[in-house]
Amino acid sequence: MTRMHTDAPGYATTRHGRAPAPGPSFGNPFLRCRCGLAGLERIHRRPWMKFLPGLRFYRCSSCGKPQLAPKRAVRDAVIAHRSAQQNER
């Protein structure tokens, strides 16, 4: 899996090149992207996010959108994605 880096706040570089221009929902961590939960990578939470202990802060490896999601939901999506890949082989 390719790691992401940020060269400017809110602007990410992904393995597919530059992320699309941020829309109105890009800065809202409560809205998820359409890429799915399986491609999320964990990033450090901001201090105010500690008040939401059931959620973790992730960045989508496809589009670069930062988002909050339940740890269990992300784990289940990753397991389902991996088992689907195993079944294809």
Image (tube, rainbow, N blue to C red):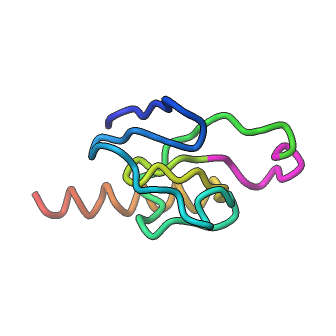
Q: Quadrant of the N terminus?
A: top left
Instruction: Tell me: residue 25, above or below residue 40.
Output: below
Q: Is residue 50 magenta?
A: yes
Q: Quadrant of residue 82?
A: bottom left
Residue in view at x 46 percent, y 62 percent: 77
Which region is colored magenta? 49-57
Depicted 50 relative to depicted 60: above or below: above
Estimate the x, y position of residue 37 in percent, counting from the top left: 48, 61
- Magenta stretch encompasses residue 82: no
The residue at the point 85 percent across, 43 percent down is 50
Q: Is residue 10 left or right of residue 77?
A: right
Name the residue furthest left: 89
Label tally: 0
Toward which corner of the image does residue 9 lie, by quadrant? top right
Question: How far across and how far down the image is residue 89, in percent?
Answer: 10, 57
| Left or right position of 29 against 77 | right
Location of residue 10 (image quadrant)? top right
Q: Position of residue 19 (x, y in %)?
A: 40, 50
Q: Nearer the viewer, residue 24 or 67?
A: 24
Residue at coordinates 61% horizontally, 66% vertically from top-left? 25
Q: Residue at x 46, y 30 (%)?
A: 5
User: Viewed as shown, does residue 46 lie left or right of 61?
Assistant: right
